[in-house]
Image: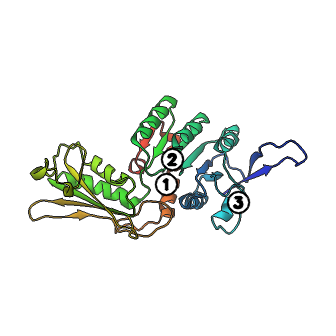
Amino acid sequence: MAAVNCHFFQLSRHLKPSRPSFSCSASQPSQNNIKVIINGAAKEIGRAAVVAVTKARGMELAGAVDNHFVGEDIGLLCDMEEPLEIPVVSDLTMVLGSISQGKEVGVVIDFTDPSTVYENVKQATAFGMKSVVYVPRIKPETVSALSALCDKATMGCLVAPTLSIGSILLQQAVIMASFHYNNVELVESRPNAADLPSPEAIQIANNISNLGQIYNREDSSTDVQARGQVIGEDGVRVHSMVLPGLPSSTQVYFSSPGDVPNARPTPSNQKGGTPQGNMETSKNSPSINLLLLSNHLPLFSLVFQNLVYGLEKFL
């Protein structure tokens, strides 16, 4: 795969100080390769994405953006055998401008923060580039604003609440089972109490709501707090536990007389920032999941012209 060489050029100390300039030049260039910019590249999940992109066909890492480790080679930062000659920079616009000048197809993968993701996607859209967003705890109003932005610009954006293939399979299995049971409860465990119920639990509850099914009719009007929080209007109850030291997990219990199945992921201690929870039949690591995502980027960059919410719709 061709590598993109990016260098800083700093003015002499005897001259008036100015911001460093930035240039990218590709060795062994390929006009067909999609240029990928990783925003949040210094995070563990960002580093996993860097490795995944360098292994994927039809793509080139074109930039690594982060406010930490600025100036360091992203390849060395990812413990790769050789440097990629791509420095970490803090200015996303600088990298976007460099890629757009070559009139090449580019995609920005964003691992930053809920407070900055809208502006990041807006910048990428202004330069004619699509975005893939994995930002935990992104607010629904931010997703709505991104959707309106993408519709107006006719530009694709994938917002992935989870990169865990096991979590996606769990959600699909829950939707199928919900048509056959009248009682359903979610039990989740998280290491801290921030943002409970979790985005994953809320998404599962929303996925099985508005399907013409009312759950837990026996005590639908109870005000006993121990019964958990009702999410949505169809009676789905969520019980959140805070257990520091244990991996995050989500279990979904269904029941009918004589039949009590449950769908639960097998927690793991994978690093990289992806939600814990690959199902027993799928023990993919974050880097493998990111590689699977990267392999679909060429299709995404060509086909989607609006916001897509959920990795399952993309795969």
Query: Which residue is labeled 2 in the image?
Result: 132
Q: Residue at x 47, y 37 (%)?
A: 146
Q: Which of label 3 and label 2 is nearer to you?
A: 3
Q: Nearer the viewer, residue 32 or 48?
A: 48
Above-or-below relation of 204 to 117: below
Q: Residue at x 60, y 49 (%)?
A: 36
Query: Which residue is labeled 1 in the image?
Result: 293
Q: Position of residue 91 (x, y in %)?
A: 67, 45
Residue type at mark 2?
Val
Q: Callout 3: few (<14), some (14-19), or many (20+) C-alpha neighbours within 10 Å?
A: some
Q: Nearer the viewer, residue 246 or 36?
A: 246
Residue type at mark 1?
Leu
Disc number for residue 73: 3
Q: Secondary structure under badge 3? A: loop
Residue type at mark 3?
Asp
Q: Cα distance, mark 3 to mark 2?
A: 23 Å
Q: Residue at x 33, y 65 (%)?
A: 265
The quarter of the picture where the N terminus appears is bottom right
Q: Secondary structure under badge 2? A: strand
Q: Secondary structure under badge 1? A: helix
248 left or right of 150 in image? left
